[in-house]
Image (cartoon, coloured by chain):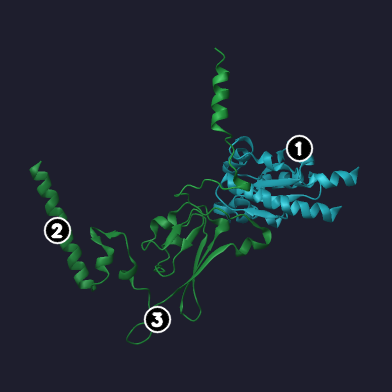
Amino acid sequence: MHKYLKRFVHKSPWLYRINAGSCNGCDVELATTALIPRYDVERLGCKYCGSPRHADIVLISGPLTTRVKERVLRVYEEIPRPKITVAVGICPISGGVFRDSYSIEGPMDRYIPIDVNVPGCPPRPQAIMEGILKACEIWKKRIVEVA
Amino acid sequence: MLPFLKILVRNIIKGPATEAFPFGETYTPKRLRGRAELDPSRCLTCGICSHVCAGGAIAMTESADGRGMEFRLWHNTCTFCGLCEHYCPANAITMTNDWHLSHEQSEKYTCCEVQFVEYPVCEKCGERMLPRLHQRLSKGLVGSVSTAEIMRICPDCRRLTSAMHQIKSKVSLTAGRSNS
């Protein structure tokens, strides 16, 4: 049964959003890619889920503020392996306009391994879809490696 | 009566609202601000772009041998605000409408716009000097005088021309006031 499922599982990755102190701009765009029929990320088999324990692909927005750092790491630990991380927006990638601020714990890849970067402030919904597609491909490879 | 029937028919005629994007083309507005691009043949190396850059994405470093200036724009910290394009006095930076910027982590630090602006050589002594301003300036005014015009003449004449311009504008202003 387990083997049988593995043949299909790569077709429907579940997405999970983490807001690591984002200004909400990228989160609005993320919601747009899923909720607005014009972009409709569910065509690709992706689906947003409410619990980190069901997630396959993690979308992180925000520059990782000092206050939220511990919580983000705790939530990230709950996501089952193999997890693919997508940094959405320039904040998690480089710190963006908040770089070198006193309350920013620096770029996300200092603490969390990132797989795909989607730069933009905020990125277009189409750009996010492109990033998710890239993540899906990595996930396909990784799920075979783990199996 | 039964208003949903009208909506149903309208939706059937209109077709799906979903874009074909990952499998087909998508609509990109012409003026969308995406990846910034530099034309090194127009750059003055004045550095106003790195000064106004909101995300601190632009770095300009002079090469060690003094041959020119290296322009480096890291897309991963660019906010697409377009300030560099707005303030560039020579129209060297343009925001293209290319938004295909997503990349894998291995390309994080190579996702840059790198251009080398070479300094021109003095015709007399062969020394490197700053790019010739009057050939490259295309917009902007110093007071009421066009900067492109003022860069071709010596500082003394420059002072004279801008003074004349100021006098002219003052005269026309007062004339306008007295007429009304």
Residue B48 is left or right of residue B169, and the answer is: right
Question: In percent of the image, x 87 and y 52: which residue is there?
Answer: A147
What residue sits right under mark 3 in the picture? Answer: B128
* Chain coloured cyan here: A
- Residue farthest bottom in this picture: B125
Mark 3 and mark 1 in contact? Answer it, CB < 8 Å. Answer: no
Whole-Å distance between the Cαs marked 2 and 1? Answer: 72 Å
User: Do the dots labelled 3 and 1 sit on one chain?
Assistant: no
Identify the element where label 2 is drawn. Answer: helix
The residue that label 2 is drawn on is B167
Q: Chain of mark 2?
A: B
The image shows residue A66 at horizontal and vertical percentages of 66, 48
Number of numbered discs visible in the structure rendering: 3
Q: Quadrant of residue B48?
A: bottom left
Counting residues from the start of the chain, the first of labels 2 and 3 encountered is 3
Q: Which residue is mark 1?
A: A51
Q: Amino acid at mark 2?
A: Ile
Question: Which one is nearer the viewer's eye here, B125 or B93?
Answer: B93
> Amino acid type of disc 3?
Arg
The amino acid type, in three-letter code, at marker 1 is Ser
Q: Chain of mark 1?
A: A
Identify the secondary structure beneath mark 1.
Answer: loop
Q: Are marks 2 and 1 on the same chain?
A: no
Q: Position of residue A36 (x, y in %)?
A: 60, 35
Q: Colour of chain B?
A: green
Mark 2 and mark 3: Cα distance apart in space:
38 Å
Residue A82: image tag? none
User: Which of label 2 and label 3 is nearer to you?
Assistant: 3
Q: Residue at x 27, y 69 (%)?
A: B151
Q: How far is mark 3 from mark 1, CA to CA?
A: 62 Å
Nearer mark to the viewer, of 2 and 1: 1
